[in-house]
Image (cartoon, rainbow, N blue to C red):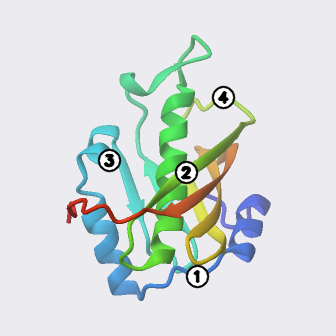
Amino acid sequence: MNADDPQLATLRARAQAIPLDEPARLEWARQFNRLPGLTHFGLAVDLADPLLVRVTLASIEEHHVGGLRSRAVHGGVLAGIFDCALGVAGTLQFDARRAGTCELSLKFMRAVLEAPLEVFGACIKRTDNLAFAESALYSNGKLCAIATGIVAVAADRGAQAIW
């Protein structure tokens, strides 16, 4: 990925810092990457950057394709990858409180045909209970889609932690 990409530079300039130090970010990502949904999808979350969440899909598999009745990655798969990037970017703003994506808006600009896929997400603004996030998806280094989302703190109804 070209670090000088204007879309990525704009996202980085507007991003709020992830409020964890590097060892805590790396441990959070290690735990999150063990979730069955991520391993099944083939996704990996990288939190090495103090501003941006990076979600990668290293290879496009048969179960990822079908968009446009072609070999393009299906829009539902792309929505899931965006949900991961935006959800993580927002959730990390709320320390140990549970949070999740409550709104997701996607804009597709070109078909996603080549691996690797990289989605960069960042929290742009937050309140006590909401985080507003933005992200950009690149296919083999080309910008293909952008998304925005809102992450909300969940009411504590006694759900059990998964890690």
- Residue 102: numbered disc: 2
Q: Residues within 10 Å of mark 2 (few under 14, many from 20)?
A: some
| Circle nearer the N terminus (4, 1) | 1
Q: Give how far across and how far down residue 137 sits, in percent.
A: 62, 48
Q: Tell me what residue is drawn at x 58 percent, y 82 percent.
A: 17
Q: Residue furthest top?
A: 69
Q: Is residue 96 depicted above or below 7 in this figure?
A: below
| Circle nearer the N terminus (3, 2) | 3
* Distance CA(mark 4)–CA(mark 3): 22 Å
- Residue 111: numbered disc: 4
**Circle count:** 4
* Distance CA(mark 3)–CA(mark 1): 24 Å
Q: Is residue 70 depicted above or below 5 in this figure?
A: above
- Specify the amino acid type for callout 1: Ala
Q: Tell me what residue is drawn at x 20 percent, y 66 percent.
A: 163
Question: Is the C-beta separation of discs 3 and 2 under 8 Å?
Answer: no
Q: Tell me what residue is drawn at x 61 percent, y 57 percent.
A: 150
Callout 3 secondary element:
helix
Where is residue 139, by image quadrant? Answer: top right
Question: Is the C-beta separation of discs 4 and 1 under 8 Å?
Answer: no
- Residue 8: numbered disc: none
- Residue 38: numbered disc: 3
Q: Which residue is mark 1?
A: 17
